[in-house]
Amino acid sequence: MTIDDIRQKIDALDRQLLEMFNERANLALEIGKIKKTLDLPVYDPSRESRIFDAMKAANPGPLDDDAIVRLFERVIDESRSLERIRTKGL
């Protein structure tokens, strides 16, 4: 396999990640609407902890658990920001 072959596979994975990130964001927005109607806070530290624990438990590597947590912290932070912005006027 050549570098170009590998890069093509990475490009395809990047497109899949993009699709999944946006799908996850849409689901977070749905949760945000529900939280707004129930007057629940956007930030739920216990939920985030459970996500991090589950992802570390499922992590086969080669990324170490700290790297996985950092990645998911960023994804969750962006979802939370979007949730706050989009549910502000509801």
Image (tube, rainbow, N blue to C red):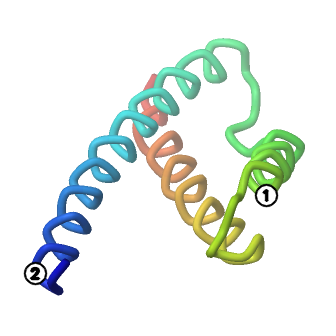
The structure residue drawn at horizontal position 56% and vertical position 28%, both measured from the top left corner, is: 32
Q: Disc 1 versus disc 2: distance between alpha carbons? A: 31 Å
Q: Looking at the picture, how far across and down is residue 6, in whole percent?
A: 22, 75
In the rendered structure, find residue 56 and report the number of the disc placed on it: 1
Mark 1 or mark 2: whose residue is earlier in sequence: 2
Quadrant assignment, res 19:
top left
Give the labeled residue for mark 2: 4
The structure residue drawn at horizontal position 47% and vertical position 27%, both measured from the top left corner, is: 27
Q: Counting other residues with Cα less than 10 Å from the Cα at mark 1, is it few (<14), some (14-19), or many (20 or more)?
A: some
Q: In this rendering, would 60 be left or right of 16? A: right
Of 16 and 6, the residue lying toward us: 6
Residue kind at label 1, given as amino acid type: Lys
Of 14 and 38, the residue lying toward us: 14
The structure residue drawn at horizontal position 73% and vertical position 21%, both measured from the top left corner, is: 39
In the rendered structure, find residue 77 and report the number of the disc placed on it: none
In the image, residue 16 sits, relative to residue 8, either above or below, namely above
Q: Looking at the picture, how far across and down is residue 78, in whole percent?
A: 49, 57
